[in-house]
Image (cartoon, rainbow, N blue to C red):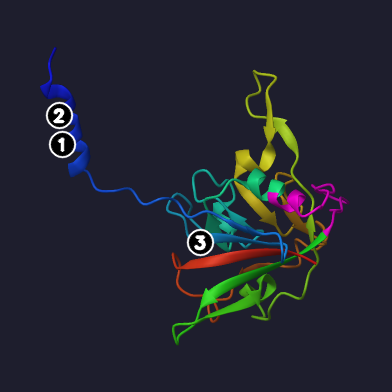
């Protein structure tokens, strides 16, 4: 038996740099709050020739996040885990909307973002304040945010197995009903989508890539 082989593997393992654990979300049942580590998302992705208006709030990074080119923040948690956390507060998901005439339903939640300040502290702002109209520069008005839960779909068209849609697309929170593969949606419909073209509020938000915290709380 070659006794040197396990020793070599052990020495190799010691020489490799430690891998930092991915940040995880915090669920506070006393305040009914979910805190999700996130980062300010890039607005221009290398594979695209233009910058698209914001249509969602939080997605997985590209390429797992199918709408990572039109989001405020990126995160790394699993959307269905956020769904389970909301259910642990006693909430029952409503129904996500998609397409013309569809309206999202579900228990209302509050969505905020904790961002760093110039003095080394932090401030928590409504997610609407992180968005401004591309033409006027005015902040997005206050919206209602609903725990809709996601559509359930086939992960592979050739198989009968079904999966939580938001896990497949990586979208956690949507503004317009452009997809029903989300966990949370607003009260906006597709009628407003052509009229409201939003961009991130660069006067308020820190630079792209800055760690922030996305906070979801039961109202």
- Residue at horizontal 73 percent and vertical 53 percent from the top: 86
Return the residue at label 2: 7
Q: Is residue 128 left or right of residue 77?
A: right
- Badge 1 marks a residue whose secondary structure is helix
Crowd around label 3: few <14 · some 14–19 · many ≥20 (10 Å)? many
Q: Is residue 201 magenta?
A: no
Q: Quadrant of residue 145?
A: bottom right
How far is mark 1 from mark 3, CA to CA?
39 Å
Residue 180 in view: yes
**Location of residue 84 in the rendering, given as x and y in whole percent from the top left corner:** 70, 46
- Residue at horizontal 75 percent and vertical 39 percent from the top: 151
How far is mark 2 from mark 3, CA to CA?
43 Å
Which of the marked residues, 1 or 3, is nearer the chain's N terminus? 1
Question: Mark 2–mark 3 contact, CB under 8 Å?
Answer: no
Crowd around label 1: few <14 · some 14–19 · many ≥20 (10 Å)? few
Q: Quadrant of residue 4?
A: top left
**Looking at the rendered structure, which numbered label has been put on residue 41?**
3
Return the residue at label 1: 11
Q: Is residue 106 magenta?
A: yes
**Location of residue 79 in the rendering, given as x and y in whole percent from the top left corner:** 63, 47
Tag nearer the camera, 1 or 3: 1
Tell me where the magenta segment starts and ends, as one range.
85-107
**Location of residue 115 in the rendering, given as x and y in whole percent from the top left corner:** 53, 74
């Amino acid at each position: 038996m070659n006794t040197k082989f396990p020793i070599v593997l052990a020495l190799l393992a010691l020489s490799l740099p430690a891998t930092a654990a991915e940040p995880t979300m915090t669920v506070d049942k006393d305040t009914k709050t979910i805190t999700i580590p996130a980062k300010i998302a890039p607005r221009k992705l290398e594979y695209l020739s233009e910058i698209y208006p914001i249509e969602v709030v939080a997605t997985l990074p590209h390429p797992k996040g199918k709408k990572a080119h039109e989001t405020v923040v990126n995160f790394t948690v699993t959307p269905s885990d956020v769904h389970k956390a909301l259910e642990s507060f006693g909430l029952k998901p409503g129904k996500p909307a998609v397409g013309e005439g569809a309206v999202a339903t579900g228990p209302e939640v509050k969505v905020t973002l904790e961002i760093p300040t110039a003095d080394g502290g932090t401030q928590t702002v409504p997610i609407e304040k992180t968005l401004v109209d591309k033409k006027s520069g005015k902040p997005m008005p206050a919206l209602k945010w609903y725990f809709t839960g996601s559509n359930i779909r086939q992960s592979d068209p050739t198989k009968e197995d079904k999966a939580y849609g938001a896990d497949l697309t990586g979208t956690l929170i949507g503004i317009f009903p452009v997809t029903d593969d989300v966990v949370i949606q607003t009260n906006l419909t597709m009628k407003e989508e052509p009229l409201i073209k939003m961009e991130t509020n660069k006067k308020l938000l820190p630079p792209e890539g800055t760690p922030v915290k996305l906070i979801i709380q039961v109202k």
